[in-house]
Image (cartoon, coloured by chain):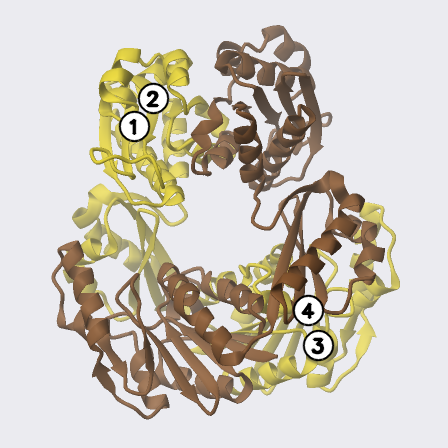
Chain colours: A yellow, B brown
Amino acid sequence: MVRAEVITIGDEILFGQITDTNTQWIGTELTNIGIRPIRKSSVGDTEAAILEVLAEAEARADVILITGGLGPTKDDITKTTMCKYFDTELVINEHALEIITSFFVKRGRPMTELNRQQAALPKACTYIANYWGTAPGMWFERNGKVFISMPGVPFEMKNLMTNAILPKLKEFFETPVIQHKMIRTVGIGESFLAERIEAWEDALPPHIRLAYLPSFGQVKLRLTATGTDAEQLKAENQAQVDKVLPLIQEFVFGFDDDEMETVVGRLLKERGETVATAESCTGGYVSHLLTKIPGSSHYFVGGIVSYSNEVKINQLGVKPETLAEFGAVSEATVIEMSEGVRQRLGTTYGIAASGIAGPNGGSEEKPVGTIWIACAGPSGTVTQKLQLGKFREQNIQYTGIYLLNVLRKQILANR
Amino acid sequence: MVRAEVITIGDEILFGQITDTNTQWIGTELTNIGIRPIRKSSVGDTEAAILEVLAEAEARADVILITGGLGPTKDDITKTTMCKYFDTELVINEHALEIITSFFVKRGRPMTELNRQQAALPKACTYIANYWGTAPGMWFERNGKVFISMPGVPFEMKNLMTNAILPKLKEFFETPVIQHKMIRTVGIGESFLAERIEAWEDALPPHIRLAYLPSFGQVKLRLTATGTDAEQLKAENQAQVDKVLPLIQEFVFGFDDDEMETVVGRLLKERGETVATAESCTGGYVSHLLTKIPGSSHYFVGGIVSYSNEVKINQLGVKPETLAEFGAVSEATVIEMSEGVRQRLGTTYGIAASGIAGPNGGSEEKPVGTIWIACAGPSGTVTQKLQLGKFREQNIQYTGIYLLNVLRKQILANR
């Protein structure tokens, strides 16, 4: 197995001033091509610290990926430090200079000597063109080991990796063939899921590994098959999926990159159906989930965020008597909300949520986390009561996913 | 300066399966009490890797903070590895056992031998009670250096740090007194801000440092004063704020922990005023921002997500002629949207957004990223045209912040 270390350079990461999303992304991508990350390190902007971490990584790993410290200002010292580490010197790279120059010309901005110096690269490295920014990538080889230096800007780093570095690594190291298959479930906890599929999991062949990846009411099951023949591995993954699906069918909403909102959107679009939202406790979050997806205007017509009772009555047609008798957080109210928005906005489905998101506002009878959801459609209205936790933002997010899942099931039931 | 290293343990971090939010949080908290993080490392769940990183960290740092690997299952080996590193053995801690037992009793769940073993701690460590989960914290001392082992669950780790470890560290190391002051700006880029305040920044005394922290249309300016007297440092920070404010007043929306939505909420609540939203391209995101805040029902009445033209016409009263003549993305339309929602929902203010969020749907005249926003209030309606980028989610987020900022300015203008 080829071993990798990932090094990030910058005081701002150590001091917690920025969120490092790079190393997680790099870890996933390396794992995907069969390279095993064995260490991640962050060091500050000092030459001694960078030299030390490079030497440590070289002793342990086959490939060392470095991000950050390539900006034009004085505190970015990765390039000069790499020169020192590889006992080489900086030389202007003409192609890099061309790209940087055109970058400034396009934006109509003046180019300084500092920017010109970004085209200066260590003689010992292979230049990797950065068409997405001004700091080029660098590829060093020594004793069969590879060092890669990339800019820290996530957009630039990801483009360099995807378009140049990952293909180059696959070629250089003859990495094994890896195939992933993801099953996405909702509404069942990790341990209950594990119990249901225990026998299947124990019977997996050694070259197919299973990972449980939980997040917000969802658990992703990821199969990773390692071997030499991509088509065969793909078929083996699929055979395992076919075996396990009957055990967990009612919880599975998608595969691979499917998100709940894309699955729902795809179903609606296929059927030429539409949806509208009536949101109380989720306060617009469900509409936001639906409209995050490009092209959602094909099936999402609009919604009413009915935070006050007046809006529930005037904009959704909820009866004042219903609110008086059962309260805003009740099955009767979400039924009228979902049916009201469906009728007024003229959609195939109307979905609604009303509850106590917290942290305050609960009672003995309806504690914080009590939430009613409903979906009105051509064949009637279904409801569900959720009993969630104490944390406002989590309650909003869980409710969003569960409400879209109720909609998904209704769409499928109307097939 | 006391130097710290932060070590996270777990294959799932290396392989990119989970997002590590712990180390950023720890980095911030350590910096806040005057301890300098000099290295962050992540290693997998193997004894050799953990022993190696511990020895490296001990050679460089004064305090080593370790998270993860404390679960009840076999792959969690931090505790036994710490025993090996400190040449000690595991002994059941009675207080820890009590907490763990009551944890299971409260939840009515059976307790297994594996759970009981979570109360077994290395003899050489000082026990740190974890009232938020089942894995206790551990504090080791050797040659004036401190090693701290904590569970990886963020909620538990943060509670252990805040309630026990940070106070203990401040006492043990006699760290300097640090005072932070944050100024929050919106609508001006980092480099333009830097130009405006260059003379002020250059004149800062050496014990007060300035950091620029940019995110989504906002730039936070953070002053960090280091010394011995908290009250004096606080006063010095405030004096610097008073000096710089006149240079950037029109961009400042808050201080310290203020978020745009909390500032707007506070202003509305103080004045007993209300707001309603009419959202097209932001699709519910602005309502979601407002309702994320507990107690927002005091000033947020509701909103209309008018994705389709029919909803704009029927629910908001936008004139069909306006849409026909100027299009949905136009100043005329957002004026009618904001005034319509204000009138129909009976609020002090109505805010509206309509634009092309992308990635498709643009034209020569109105490219992707063209967005109109409006705020209708007691003294009339103001509008603003935004020209944003190509990325849908970013466009939605920027628009949300800018729209709330227009509302904020209108509230202040109506003083």
Residue identified by numbered label 4: A69
Looking at marks 2 and 1 on the same chain, the residue that comes earlier in the sequence is marked by: 2
Q: Quadrant of residue A180?
A: bottom left
- Left or right: where B306 falls relative to B101: right
Mark 1 or mark 3: whose residue is earlier in sequence: 3
Mark 4 or mark 3: which comes first in sequence? 4
Q: CA distance from mark 1 to mark 4?
A: 51 Å
Label 3 crowding class (10 Å Cα cut-off): few <14, some 14-19, many 20+? many
For the C terminus of chain B, give its image quadrant: top right
| Residue at image location 78% in from the left, 58% down from the top | A99
| Residue B238 can be seen, yes or no | yes
- Chain letter of mark 4 equals A
Where B314 sits versus A42, above or below? above
Q: Is residue B59 above or below residue B415?
A: below
Q: Which residue is mark 1?
A: A411
Q: Residue at x 26, y 66 (%)?
A: B134
How far apart marks 2 and 1 lie (CA) works out to 9 Å
Marks 4 and 2 sit apart, C-alpha to C-alpha, by: 52 Å
For marks 1 and 4, give the one nearer the viewer. Answer: 4
